[in-house]
Amino acid sequence: MPTTIDHWIGGKSAAGESGRLAPVWNPATGREQAQVRLASSADVDAAVAAAAAAFQSWRHESLTKRSRVMFRLRDLVERHELELAKIIAAEHGKVVDDARGEIVRGREVIEFACGVTSALKGGLSVDVSGGVDSYDFREPLGVCAGVTPFNFPVMVPMWMHPVAIATGNTFVLKPSERDPSASRFIAELYARAGLPDGVFNVVNGDKEAVDALLTNPDVAAVSFVGSTPIARYIHEQATANGKRVQALGGAKNHAVVLPDANMDWAANQLAAAAFGSAGQRCMAVSVAVAVGDAADELVDLLKVKAEAVAVGPGDDPESEMGPVVTRAACDRVTGYIDSSLVQGATPVVDGRDLKIEGHQDGFFVGPTVLDHVTPDMDVYQDEVFGPVLAVVRVETLEAAIDLINANPYGNGTAIFTFDGGAVRTFERGVDVGMIGVNVPIPVPNAHYSFGGWKDSLFGSSHIHGPEGVQFYTRAKVVTARWPKHTEAQAAQLNFPTSS
Ligand code: NAD
């Protein structure tokens, strides 16, 4: 019998009442390794009720106590990093060292949350009027929900829950049903860190669970990260139900290489950003925009780099790149390579027929480089979410910027050059939320906020960092005066003005 992965509600494991289950695959072997429970709306309501009850006391815990929980959680996550990375690798397929990288980046958000006292500092203006002071402070919203994708099962939820919880909210996480075990593990670490029962809950599930979160009146805010069609749906439904929402969607990240760039550096960075995690990162570089004379040299180098990537199961220390997450993902990615060749792209490296010794049933696609890709091709228009790098050739920096701005996505982009003037033109000219300069995956440090533009983000707030604190709290502004017991003032019916 495969293992069954339960929910975590009110500080303990819960089977729920739905009885529905979904398979959890081992992408390296192609075999089912566990089953995850799919919550009914009643199961979700139970988790929200636990979180709503816990909110009544958690909201009043001192900032010192909340930040101490975060300090302890941070240490536990560090201590269990390898164990957690192996859990991620087994269900997602990425290599263990890559999984450790996402844990470190997630931990940075916990470190930010340890400083919640600074992050929540309000303002005070003395004597805004004669004898009158004004000050403001921020309070938590209540029960916040997170709905997260398969590709970063630890880091993306950590963009949300440490900030929400440290600012005084309680949280219900609905992780991806494809790799749910890491979230259960984090729930147990929170309990060991001293977080009271019900403050952090995990419900596993699919659309039924998500819809129950979107309609439950006790959910105050929803943070979503996933594909663009679902992000759009979540934004529409959550706002229609009166909730605060931030919904981060898919991406098509372009890296522009100018002829003066350090070409070997650029090719290395592009290969790492295109093929790391088998291209299943929202910040993966999927389009290399080669400007002018850069193209031929860049393509030659990319061929060498792509062919050198060691592909294998995530738990093999020799592997640099693992499989994609499911058989369906594998078929989708190879389908895009097929169609690109029919539509006129030139195959430089073709990963379709890769077979890994001893893992013939695994969901492997090899690193792929396609040259002479044009914007009308399916492989350019859609988010492929696999280890496929499309090279588009343009003549000028301005044409590269126009190409990026014509794309519906605006998550991340990068430029490789030594020309500061070109960088300035680029960073001011692109309609994209996160920009790298000789850096291929510009995921901001946790003290900044993360977010794209256009179809890569619905809602007005980026995630974690200062905008995360704003998202999970609301302001109160106080106007105060302290008259003497004996002081008299006649009633004045005119609108009060400052003096
Ligand atoms: P997905 O949209 O399929 O799933 C994301 C979450 O939504 C999961 O928890 C899933 O259970 C739920 N969901 C799926 N279908 C639903 C439906 N019809 N109604 C309600 N909920 C539903 O995404 P995925 O395949 O898990 O992850 C990959 C996608 O996430 C890519 O598009 C990637 O670019 C994107 N992503 C974006 C960012 C970012 O920061 N912008 C970060 C990571 C991943």
Image: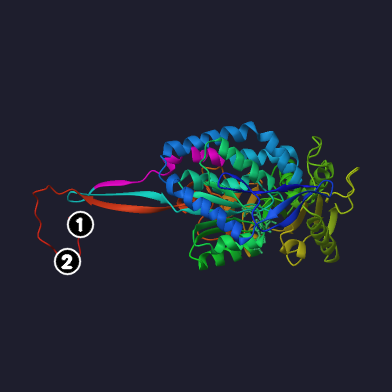
Q: Is mark 2 within 8 Å of ligand 1?
A: no
Foreground: 164 or 410?
A: 164
Instruction: Compute the Cα span from label 2 to label 1.
Output: 12 Å
Q: Quadrant of ligand 1?
A: bottom right
Residue 94: in magenta span: no
Q: Nearer the viewer, residue 148 or 249?
A: 148
Residue 375 rendering spot, x and y as whole percentages? 73, 64
Residue 330 percent location from the top left of the image: 81, 55
Magenta residue span: 108-126
In this orientation, does residue 404 appear? Answer: yes
- Numbered badge on residue 498: 1
Q: Residue at x 59, y 60 (%)?
A: 42
Kindly report which numbered mark, 2 or 1, lies closer to the viewer in this rendering.
2
- Identity of the amino acid at label 2? Asn
Label at residue 494: 2
Q: For the residue labelled by badge 1, is the local secondary structure a helix, a strand or a loop? A: loop
Q: Quick one: 442 or 43, which is closer to the camera?
A: 43
For mark 2, give the secondary structure: loop
Residue type, mark 1 in image: Ser
Q: Which mark is residue 163?
A: none
- Rendered residue at 76%/61% (across/down): 379
